[in-house]
Image: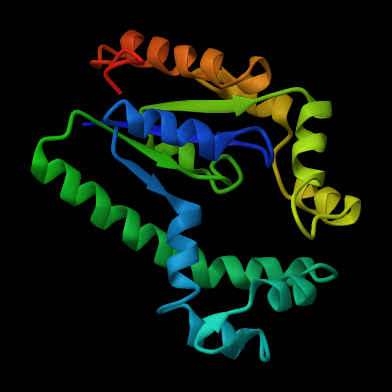
Amino acid sequence: MLLLGLTGSIGTGKSTTAKMFAAQGIPVNDADQVVHELYAGEAVPLIEAAFPGTTADGKVDRALLARQLIDNPEGFKRLEAIVHPLVRQKEVAFLEQERAKGTPAVLLDIPLLYETGGEKRLDKVIVVTCSPETQAERVLARPGMTEEKFKSILARQVPDAEKRQRADFIVDTEQGMEAARAQVRDILTELGLETKEPDDA
């Protein structure tokens, strides 16, 4: 089974690109979605113990957690030490399930792929990119996003130029969704995987 990794800096269109792979029949394990589920499940008591006052109604309150973390780089390490092993467990379960089905390829959507050394366990890495101007425009249009928050997120991510250099494949979302879809099909064809034409998807 071919293990593909998908990553990209905030605002480059990574989640949309992951959906394009899913539409081509590639099972996707979305690390962000897994974290979302953990924040409403088994991670809650662990995060409350490490960051008191950041949970409410049995869920992690992301806004309260973000407030505690924004001026506390050490806090990020503590949070990652709680969350990353749980995310990995879910990923392992996903891979076992797909292997048992005889799935030819899967996509692991991992925002902090290079930051966590995740590329070592993958066959190929696909990086989603766009211009810095488009990226800033997309991110700053998000509700509750500020310049300060955006800079703090970027500071924790490997720069886009370095990601592109290290990638096996690149999907550039600058030219719009249709162009990105065509790039996704090209990547799958190059990897010897079947693709669906737009009308079939």
- Residue at the location (46% across, 12% down)? 182
Q: Of 63 and 187, which appears nearest the observer?
A: 63
Q: Residue furthest front?
A: 199
Q: Is residue 61 above or below residue 71?
A: below
Q: Is residue 100 above or below residue 79?
A: above
Name the quadrant of the C terminus.
top left
Residue 179 picture quarter: top right
Residue 47 picture quarter: bottom right
Residue 63 in the image: x percent, y percent? 71, 73
Residue 118 in the image: x percent, y percent? 47, 43
Q: Residue furthest right?
A: 147
Name the quadrant of the N terminus.
top left
Q: What colour-coding does the image apply?
A: rainbow
- Residue at the location (89% across, 55% down)? 148
Residue 139 picture quarter: top right
- Residue at the location (68% across, 66% down)? 76
Residue 175 in the image: x percent, y percent? 65, 14
Residue 145 in the image: x percent, y percent? 80, 55
- Residue at the location (43% across, 35% down)? 19
Q: How many marks?
A: 0
Left or right: residue 95 versus residue 126 is left
